[in-house]
């Protein structure tokens, strides 16, 4: 099963770059890596997705090494509004069907 | 934009009651999911459905059942509510059940069982 492991929490000052790493040692060949952001009292929302190397969009970058056993979400110059919980998701096909199982997430606190 | 609507934001029920949580999506998605979210435990998958009348167990199905009679609607049922089912419940949908298609979530139902 492609379980994920992330730090429980991180603190950062406004304006800094934040990197959150997720470990997924048992990732399957066809699995993609997806990151979500969740604010209090809301459901998670999609941030970025990748398969290998680097992906960048208007919100974040995602770095994936060649072995794909980990991935790093990079948030450039964070602001107070980036305070949220960030989840890494990898497809779980261990049961013969595709269960999308989340890890426990990383709570990012941005400090003024 | 995909809209996933959960019928209640807050719900208070008594122990032993039968509880229905409703979820509707408006994008004709094949797949729908129910998660529960608890502090320190993240999101845990209860049940999911690939098609009408089809369901599969997730990681924590005990004490729950589901119903999918129409493509757009996925209901979570607590047959006999217990206090340990007090939680935030999140519904999601996606076109494909593979991880490459992002999940679209509702804003959750916070259920309290007293």
Image (cartoon, coloured by chain):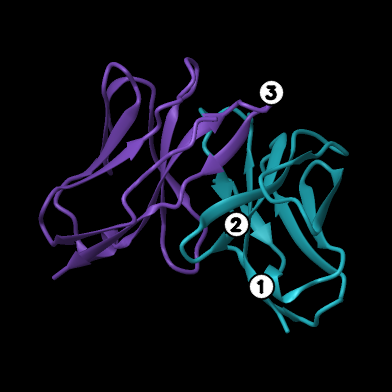
Chain colours: A purple, B cyan
The answer to whether the residue labelled 2 contacts the one labelled 3, judged by CB atoms less than 8 Å apart, is no
Q: Which mark is residue B86?
A: 1
The residue sitting at 47% across, 15% down in the picture is A29
Q: Position of residue A48 (x, y in %)?
A: 37, 37
3D distance between C-alphas at marks 2 and 3: 27 Å
Residue A12 in the image: above or below residue B109 = above
Q: Residues within 10 Å of mark 2 (few under 14, many from 20)?
A: many
Left or right placement of residue B26 versus residue A5 in this view: right
**x%, y% of residue B111?**
67, 73
Q: Would you say residue B28 is visible in this rendering?
A: no
Which quadrant of the view contains residue A74?
A: top left
Query: Which residue has dot 2 on it?
Result: B106
Q: CA distance from mark 3 to mark 1?
A: 31 Å
* Helix, strand or loop for disc 1: loop
Q: Residue at x 21, y 64 (%)?
A: A110
- Residue A97 locus on image (x, y percent): 68, 26
Q: Which residue is mark 3?
A: A96
Residue shown at the point (31%, 17%) measured from the top left: A67
Image location of residue B28, percent across then percent down: 71, 38
Residue mark closest to the camera, 2 vs 3: 3
């Amino acid at each position: 099963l492609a379980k994920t492991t992330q730090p429980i929490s991180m603190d950062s000052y406004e304006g800094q770059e934040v990197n959150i790493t997720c470990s997924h040692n048992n990732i399957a060949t066809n699995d993609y890596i997806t990151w979500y952001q969740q604010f209090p009292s809301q459901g998670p929302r999609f941030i970025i997705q990748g398969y290998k190397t680097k992906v960048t969009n208007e919100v974040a970058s995602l770095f994936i090494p060649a072995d794909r056993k980990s991935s790093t979400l990079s948030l450039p110059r964070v602001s107070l509004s980036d305070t949220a919980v960030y989840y890494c998701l990898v497809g779980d096909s261990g049961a013969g069907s595709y269960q999308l199982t989340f890890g426990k997430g990383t709570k990012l606190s941005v400090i003024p | 934009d995909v809209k996933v609507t959960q019928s209640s934001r807050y719900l208070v029920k008594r122990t032993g009651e039968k509880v229905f949580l409703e979820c509707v999506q408006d994008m004709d998605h094949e797949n729908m999911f129910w998660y529960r979210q608890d502090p320190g435990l993240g999101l845990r998958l209860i049940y999911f459905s690939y098609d009408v009348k089809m369901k599969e167990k997730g990681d924590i199905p005990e004490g729950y059942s589901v119903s999918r009679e129409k493509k757009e609607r996925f209901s979570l049922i607590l047959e006999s509510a217990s206090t340990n089912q007090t939680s935030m419940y999140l519904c999601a949908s996606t076109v494909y059940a593979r991880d490459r298609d992002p999940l679209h979530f509702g804003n959750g139902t916070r259920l309290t069982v007293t």
